[in-house]
Image (cartoon, helix red, strand yellow):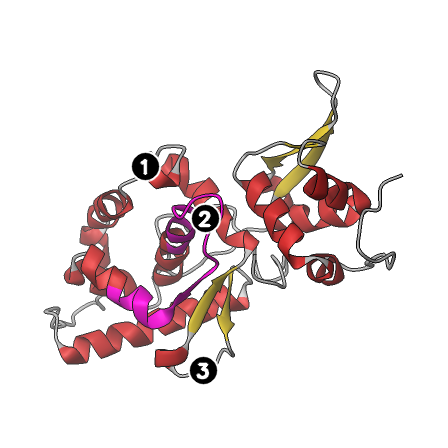
Amino acid sequence: MHDHSPSQDVPETIDALLDHNASLARSIVHKLQAGVCLDAHLGSEFRYLEWNLELWREFFSRLGYALHRSELGGEPFYYLTPQAAVVSTSRLGRGSTFLGLYLSWYFMSQGMERMDHVPARELAETLTASFDFTMLITVFNPIQKGKTRQRQESRKQFENLKGWLRTGLNELHRLRYIQLGPTQRTQWEELMVYRLPGLQRFWDLARDALALGESPETVDLSTSISRVWNAFEPEAEAETEDETDSPLADADLPGEDEGNSHAPA
């Protein structure tokens, strides 16, 4: 008989399950979301998954996945399929949608053993180096009717951009796509952005919409995103600040009542 855990205390909540053996939980989430089937050859992960299967099913259901067990070929294994019908629709702002898509690609492109956090300061620098500054201003602060706005890159505009980035990050934090640390109120220079498992939903839902490939490691995301957002530029000129829904606003993304995860993974 296998000992599924270093302790015989059985977790009763998703938080407890994820915290009980954080490294194994992280490995399970990463592998399944990457399309890997978990079987007995992945002994530790397989046993930890089977140890409390119903909690794992509940956890993945919150993310918009169904966890399946199969014995095709004679050996039992587990795999995920997206289930958009089980998550609620949430209309995220343009900036939050853009950040969610970019962060999901940024973390996933690191490979299987992915990094799980990035400094907010580094995120801002990477964005301004990867995208046209005018496009970023359009994404995060659409022009109001009858008003003009200077768009050239300047120290003041960069400070404005950091404020808009923080607003978008706060929304993603509130909806449990990411976690900000050490606390949500940490000063910008010390602020860290931790990915949560639900962040991958942006990649799953945007992959077809943006005609991206299967592997995030081979995608030229800056070109793909620029193409999409530039296509919406004429509409942005006529929008008001209250009309800031994104091109992916109708995608089925987990809403505030459908929490994603409570620990970085």
Tell me, yes or no, if residue 210 can be seen here: no
Q: Position of residue 248 (x, y in %)?
A: 39, 48
- Mark 1 or mark 3, earlier in chain: 3
- Does 211 appear above or below 13? above
Residue that badge 3 annotates? 186
The amino acid pointed to by label 2 is: Phe
Q: How far apart are marks 1 and 3 (CA)?
A: 34 Å
| Residue 117 in the figure: left or right of residue 210 | right
Helix or strand or loop: what does disc 2 sit on? helix
10 Å crowding of disc 2: few (<14), some (14-19), many (20+): many
Q: Which mark is residue 218?
A: 1
Q: How far apart are marks 2 and 1 (CA)?
A: 17 Å
Helix or strand or loop: what does disc 1 sit on? helix
| Contact between labelled residues 2 and 3, with CB atoms less than 8 Å apart | no
Q: Residue 202 carries which label?
A: 2
- Mark 3 or mark 2, earlier in chain: 3
Q: Position of residue 227 (x, y in %)?
A: 22, 44
- Does 58 appear above or below 83? below
The amino acid pointed to by label 1 is: Thr
**In the rendered image, which quarter contains the C terminus?**
bottom right
Q: Distance between the residues labelled 3 and 2?
A: 26 Å
